[in-house]
Image (cartoon, rainbow, N blue to C red):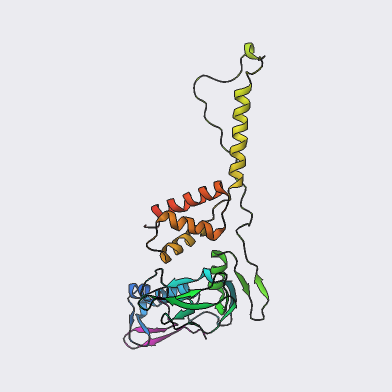
Amino acid sequence: MFSITIEAREGNCVALSSPFHPTFPKPAKAAGGRWDGKAWIFDARDVDRARAICRDIFGADDQSDPDDVLTIRAPARTCDAHGHGKFDDRPMSYWLAGRKVAHATGRDSGAFLAPGVVVIQGSFTSGGSVKNPACRFEEGTVIEVRDVPRVAAERVHERFHGVTLLDRDGNVVREPTTADSPAPEAPEPSAAPSVGPSTEPSPSSSSTTEGEGQPQRVAEQGVAEQRAAAEAIPAIPARVFEVARAIAFVLPRSSSEHVAERTADFYGYTGPEARRVFVSAVEDFLERDGGR
């Protein structure tokens, strides 16, 4: 079902044959590859680059063990959507771990599942308009993609919550993670620098009258509230920003704020303060490093 081969050709070249993937041509051309109608042709000196492209997209190359595979059971929302020649909001196909999951050919065509894909819950269908058809899936749809190279399957598990990995016999290899997974404990807030004269008590101020200690008690209470708020906001793992980047690809015309809000929805942030901090961090990332 899944095969990648690299064969020597005349003229110090190699021919790479692999399953189709919509993101493969760009890096292949960047590595000097050209499509001859049957395979990608590379200079033999660039064979390691060709293998690296395969490992990045498919999680395997021609030297990988074909039996080292797993089954991915995941929500359909974890799939990458590919549209009319680019990622947009009218996808014609869905992909996961280098594998096609489902596609549509027109508004009324219905959806076609790729080999090795099973719908556990929900369904895929087609929709949109005659000029702008799209492949859709029902909310809550869950799929299984079988015989996925282990490396690619583990990447999906690390990237998304709600993903289960199984072996060929159906035994669970990795349990799904959730948005409620415990986060590292927040660090203690640093002490504010002193300003002005020293606040150390002098011998003459060792005794106080009623009310003189109120500012100190208010300050201590403020520190305690800040500490409690900090502990209530989970640490944001680096993979969150990769998910945000993927959502930005699917919604290219959306603002960074909208993408950040969608990412917060994906991870289940509902607490107002935690959500505010999360959205702000993701939005800053998209503006600074996401090229939006």
Please provide percent x and percent y for residue 223.
60, 34
Q: Relative to the observer, which residue lies in front, 211 or 17?
A: 211
Please provide percent x and percent y for residue 250.
43, 66
Which residue shows up at 47% across the image and 53% down it?
Answer: 282
Which residue shows up at 39% across the image and 76% down it?
Answer: 129
Is residue 94 shown in magenta? no
Please provide percent x and percent y for residue 17.
42, 84
- Identify the image quadrant of residue 74: bottom right
Task: Count up the numbered dots.
Answer: 0
Is residue 19 shown in magenta? yes
Where 198 sits versus 288, above or below?
Answer: above
Please provide percent x and percent y for residue 29.
33, 75
Span of residues in magenta: 1-22
Q: Relative to the observer, which residue lies in front, 202 or 157?
A: 157
Which residue shows up at 44% across the image and 52% down it?
Answer: 283
Q: Relative to the observer, which residue lies in front, 138 or 120?
A: 138
Residue 103 visible in image:
yes
Residue 238 visible in image:
no
On screen, residue 177 versus residue 88, left or right, reads right
